[in-house]
Amino acid sequence: EKDALISQLAEEKETISQLEAEKEKLSQFVVEKEVLISQLEAEKETQTLQLMTEKETISQLTSEKETILQFMAEKETISQLAAEKETLTLQLVTEKETRSQLTAEKETLISQLTTEKETLISQLAAEKETILQLTTEKETISQLTAEKEALI
């Protein structure tokens, strides 16, 4: 009976030894599991930070895109204003040319009118002279007629 107990005790020791080995394996598994969980949490944190960084980058890029779109709209407006300026400049040049032509025509008309005025003044002076001569001759004729009648 003693041998049976020793044999049973040896078997139980072997079973305990196997159970302790399995317990050690399970402990190692738990440690490995905790390490993996810690690594996964670290990766999750890293990916969360990367995602936040990417979201911030997207936000900045969206803002830059809006700025570029505004710049393009302003550039279009500037192009339109430049075209309008060119049109107005051409109109101004045309108006200046027209004014210059009108000024030249005005000067020509003034010159013509001045010449005509001088001609008329000369004609009037000549006619006045003629009238004065005729008046003098009339007076002379009246005197001669008066003298003739006085003699008759």
Image: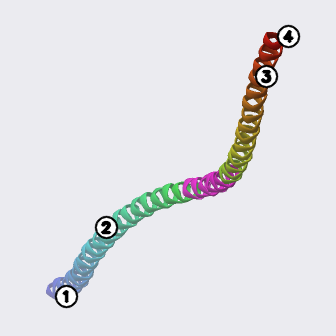
Q: Which residue is mark 4?
A: 152
Measure the alpha-carbon separation of dots 4 and 1: 206 Å
Check disc 3: other Cα within 10 Å, few if <14, some if 14-19, many if 20+.
few
Given this view, does label 3 or label 2 mark the residue nearer the observer? 3
**Residue ID at (70%, 47%):** 102
Measure the alpha-carbon separation of dots 4 and 3: 20 Å
Measure the alpha-carbon separation of dots 1 and 3: 185 Å
Label 4 vs 1, first from the N-terminus: 1
Given this view, does label 1 or label 3 mark the residue nearer the observer? 3
Q: Which residue is mark 3?
A: 138
Measure the alpha-carbon separation of dots 2 and 4: 148 Å
Check disc 1: other Cα within 10 Å, few if <14, some if 14-19, many if 20+.
few
Label 3 vs 2, first from the N-terminus: 2
Q: Could you tell me which secondary element the residue under label 3 belongs to? A: helix
Vertical side of 121 occupied by 31: above or below:
below
Q: Is residue 152 left or right of residue 121?
A: right
Highlighted range, magenta: 77-98
Q: Which residue is mark 1?
A: 10
Residue 149 colored in magenta in the image: no
Label 1 vs 3, first from the N-terminus: 1
Position in image of residue 116 (x %, y %): 75, 42
The quadrant the C terminus occupies is top right
